[in-house]
Image (tube, grey):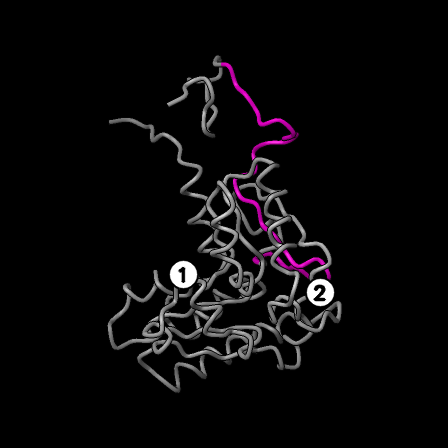
Amino acid sequence: MNRTNPYGYFSEQNDSCRIRMKQGQNMAGFPIGIIFIETVWYPYVPGNVANGYTYPFPVRLEPVRGLTCQALFDAASGVEEKVLEACIRLEKAGVRAISGACGFFGHYQKQIAGQLSVPVALSSLLQIPWILPLIKSGQRIGVLTAQKDSLTDALLENCGVTESMRERLIIRDLGHEPEFSAITEGRGSFDNGAVRDEVVSKAVEIVREDPAVGAFLLECSDMPPYAYAVQAATGKPVYDFITMIRWLCMGVTQTPYCGFL
C-alpha cells in the first residue's frame, strides 16, 4: 500500500502525508462518472440518472458527443468510439468508476470495461444476473424498457445475461406511450404524473400476466423517478440505474467505521 497517496478517503489521520494527482487532472472528489446521450431534449427530474440531486454523493456527467437515442438503440456504426472517448475523458478527470445514463450503453459494456482502469457499469441490465439468485427459481423479472425491439439478445449477452436467464424475463416497453414517448422523441416537456401512471400501469400489467413475478428491473435511466410508485403498486422489489450506481459507488468509496464500543 502506498501510504503517501491515499486511494480516496481524506481525514485528519492522513492529511499530513504527501499527496499526488494525475497529470492533467484539474478537479477531484467525483467518485462516479456518468456518460449520457448529448442530443436529447426533455426534463431530467430528480431521480433521473442525469440529475445531480438524485445522489447523496458527487457525480461527474459527461456527454457522448453527437450521440442520439436511436443511434444508441441501434448500436449504429461509430457509436462505440464516441462512448469510449467519453469514458476516457471521465477517467482522466479522476472518477473512480463509470456508469451510463441509458441501459442501451450495455451494447459496449465488455468492450469499454476491457479498455479502462476503473470499474465500468454502463447498463442497468447488468443487475439481471444479480437479481435472479435473490428470487425463487420459478419466479421471473419484469423488465420495463424504452424500446423493446432494441433490447436484443446480443445486448443482453454483453451485459452477462445468458439464454437461460432471458427465459425468465418479461419485457414491456413504453416508447410508444402518449407521454413517455416525449422522452424518446425529444419533445422538450412531458406530463410527469402521466409518465408515472404509464410506467406503473405497465408494471401492474406484468404482474397480472404472471403473478409469480419476483422483482422488477427498470432498464431506462428516465424510470427511477417512478421506482417508488412501481413498488407501491406491485409490492415487489424494484431495481434500476440508481440501485446499481449506489452499489458501484460504495465499492470505490469505502470509509473507516468509527464509534463507541
- Kind of residue at disc 2: Tyr
Q: Residue furthest top?
A: 16
Q: Residue at x 47, y 21 (%)?
A: 5
Q: Which residue is mark 2?
A: 42
Which of 128 and 159 lies nearest the eye of the viewer?
159
Q: In the rendered image, which quarter is residue 244 located in? A: bottom left
Which of 115 and 91 lies nearest the eye of the viewer?
115
Q: Which residue is mark 1?
A: 127
Compared with 146, 115 (above or below) is: above
- Residue 196 in the image: state x and y as whole percent: 57, 72
Numbered mark located on residue 144 in the image = none
- Kind of residue at disc 1: Gln
Which of 156 and 179 lies nearest the eye of the viewer?
156
- Residue 149 in the image: state x and y as whole percent: 55, 79
Task: Work out which quarter of the rendered image holds the N terminus and state it.
Answer: top left
- Helix, strand or loop under label 2: loop
Magenta-colored stretch includes residue 31: yes
At label 1, counting other C-alpha atoms closer than 10 Å, the crowd grade (few under 14, some 14-19, many 20 or more) is many
Range of magenta residues = 18-47
- Helix, strand or loop under label 1: helix
Q: Residue at x 73, y 64 (%)?
A: 41
